[in-house]
Image: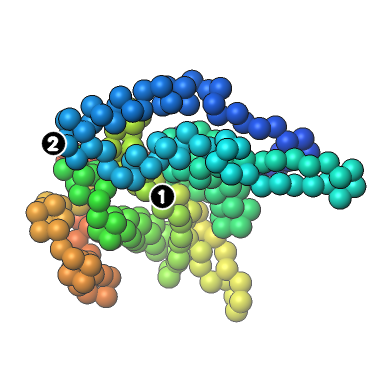
Amino acid sequence: MGTSLALWGEVTRASSVYQPHRPEQGALHQVVREHFETFRAEAETMRDGQGLPRFVEREFRDFLTCGCLAAGFARFRCATCRKDRLVPFSCKGRGFCPSCGGRRMTDRAAHLVDHVFPRVPVRQWVLSLPPRLRYVLAFDHTLCRAVVAIFVRAILAWLRRRAHRAGAADGRGGGVAIVQRFGAALNLNVHIHALIMDGVFVADGVDGVRFCPTTSMGEGELTVWRSSCSSSDRIVSGKPGASEWEKCYHPAAGNNRMSATSMRPAAGWSATVSRWD
């Protein structure tokens, strides 16, 4: 089922001493600084002169200026001792900058724990997609958002049905989904991580609600998830526009093909689950 973690522990106090992260001293910065131009030239010869996509090249160049005073800085002055300190701007990259990526990850995790999730069990769901579908979703953001919405709706509907069978009628769940675009080898691998509350909320009295956790999942329920073949073929081959996609898969249309009942084991589609109490 996964490893149990304490999501709501005490947060470490922020340090009162500013310490620059000095990215230019790191191995990654050195490799990019010394070999990026060679890599860019080789990529141009391998892609019929097109070179790297602009957003990829921009990510590399911005990373090289991250934490560099020459690329811009903010000046802070202490009102008591009148001491000045120059703080260089960060690149705010979303690709591979360890500093900016780690800061964004920490800020988002703190926000989810402090302001989004209540103190209830949370389960992580990971949806892995067929390779051909990964490339489509990598460049079609509307389609990617639609797949995320269908995936989350399928999980929430499955939790509501389990809760209904346990006597908790008209339950409502919730969660947060994040799209990850790369794999362990830094290859293009669009897949979806979803943190879903492991149960549902039901009305309790006039104004109150109570949380009904789901029962433990059996080994038979931890099967590979996938959409029906007709749904995946339509996604890859047809590539419908936003209006056609919403018409086919919007809940109001009653035609949610990627539902929990239509998902079956098959090669290429997989999901893993783990739980944090």
Label 2: which secondary element: loop
Report helix, strand or loop for mark 1.
strand
Residue at the limit of the structure toward the bottom, as seen here: 206
Q: Quadrant of residue 37?
A: top left
Amino acid found under the numbered disc labelled 1? Ile
Q: Please name the amino acid that badge 2 sits on.
A: Asp
User: What mark, if any, has residue 63 been given in the picture?
Assistant: none
**Image quadrant assignment for residue 259:** bottom left
User: Closer to the camera, 9 or 1?
Assistant: 9
Q: Which quarter of the rendering shows the C terminus?
A: top right
**Circle 2 residues within 10 Å: few <14, some 14–19, many ≥20:** few
**Position of the N terminus by quadrant:** top left
Nearer the observer, disc 2 or disc 1?
Answer: 2
- Circles 2 and 1 in contact, beta carbons < 8 Å: no
Q: Which residue is mark 2?
A: 48
At horizontal 51% and vertical 42% (from top left) the residue drawn is: 91
x and y percent of residue 92 in the render? Answer: 51, 45
Tell me which corner region of the image, top left, top right, bottom left or bottom right, holds residue 126.
Answer: top left
Q: Distance from label 2 to label 1 (Cα)?
A: 34 Å
Disc 1 crowd, CA 10 A, few/some/many (<14, 14-19, 20+)? few
Q: Earlier in the sequence, mark 2 or mark 1?
A: 2
Residue 178 disc label: 1
> In this orientation, does residue 172 appear?
yes
- Quick one: 165 or 157, which is closer to the camera? 157
